[in-house]
Image (cartoon, grey):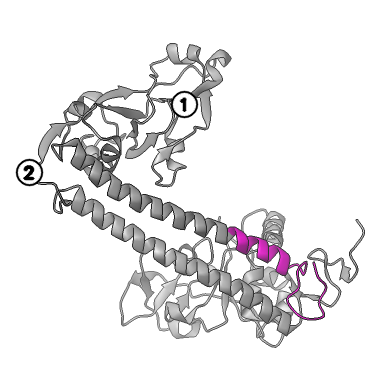
Amino acid sequence: MELMPGYKHSDVGVIPEDWDVLPLGECLVGRPSYGINAAAAPYSDALPAYIRITDISEDGRFSPEKLVSVKSEQAGNYYLSDGDIVFARTGASVGKSYRYNPNDGALVFAGFLIRVRPDANKLLPAFAAAYVTTGNYWRWVRLMSMRSGQPGINGNEYSQLPIPLPQLPEQEAIAQALSDVEALLATLDQVIAKKRDLKQAAIQQLLTGQTRLPGFSGEWEVKRLDELAEIRSGGTPSTGEPSFWDGDIPWCTPTDITALNGHKYLRETSRLITPLGLNASSAEMIPAKSVVMTSRATIGECAINAVPLSTNQGFKNFIPFVKTDVDFLYYLLGTQKQGLIALCGGSTFLEIGKTQLAAYEVRLPSTKAEQTAIATVLSEMDAELSVLESRHDKTRNIKQAMMQELLTGKTRLVEGGCDG
């Protein structure tokens, strides 16, 4: 393919003629260094916080499930400084990176991480941190891991990583543009987290009757689940019979529910069965606007099916009676996971039987009108969350597209650069 004027081939692909490519090791202050080999200790304000591979999120943030500390006389030699970048050097997460953010507090890095300190006279830390999230970087990671035969990259190998190098003003412009988008993503993350907390509080208040909506009064009632809905099970047609599969009947498995990531409506399934398959198995048709609920292993994950479907045997499905609001039932079942798990009696393989489930009791408004009013409030909160999550996804995609353009030089942000 003919090169555009002003571009050249390099070890990292086609780049502008005025860019260089250097090994990472030539752009650092000192050599890559390994973290401290010390066990994690319970978190204490009197001890430094510890960052390990597992504390780094997939998008390169310090995101521990639980803060831990490190107790060692040598810990002072392993504090991260502003501009430092650490890489995971082994295991399934090899290549994952984190650029130290002073807002995360003082951090000591662990032994399975490698620290590099970019020389800001050659390579801006923010530019380097952006580059090590690109497809080019991850292809290099896979190649280096394949060479050694096991997932792992040592300090010397990280020093060989080829880095495209614009002049510093362009590095700064690129890093700033990406930082602006990252800041928007962080703001959206905060708003989404707050909205989720508000929704959880509303669920706690409204689905227990602690807070009543205007216009409703009177005692709530206790009902068995089989008084609220018809309960149907699922089944699996023989996988050895081709005529049972790839038809036009959606067939739901727990994986389809997991893929919803907590969203309410199930609109399609990954597999389809035929009427022959349905009739030859214990699977049953579930009308649209029912609640499908996992009842094996993972208990109590729910969705409302937007289309008629069938399920495998890992489900119990609720077809609501006329006096039951389907959205309310969905939210109510979502609050009952621990109680439903308790029905399994502590067995190793968790499964709820239809008889047990039918007799399970819940407390709810005596009128469908109040059920619907509660469900409407929660549905509106879900709709707000969906809009925010969609905006977050679009912004993340924009960032990925910007990285592809800016970190390859296809689009230039400085005067005199070549336009992409």
How far from the left and from the top, in percent, is residue 249? 49, 22
- Out of 256 and 399, give the one closest to the viewer: 399
CA distance for labels 1 and 2? 41 Å
How far from the left and from the top, in percent, is residue 321? 24, 26
Q: Residue at label 1? A: 251
Give, as a three-letter code, the residue at label 2. Gly
**Picture quadrant of residue 219:** top left
Q: Quadrant of the N terminus?
A: bottom right
How far from the left and from the top, in percent, is residue 121? 70, 88
Q: Where is 130 relative to 278, above or below?
A: below
- Out of 232 and 102, give the one closest to the viewer: 232
Q: Residue at x 49, y 32 (%)?
A: 269
Which SS class for mark 2? loop
First to last magenta residue range = 397-420
In reply to whether residue 411 is colored magenta, the answer given is: yes
Give, as a three-letter code, the residue at label 1. Trp
Q: Residue at label 2? A: 218
Disc number for residue 1: none
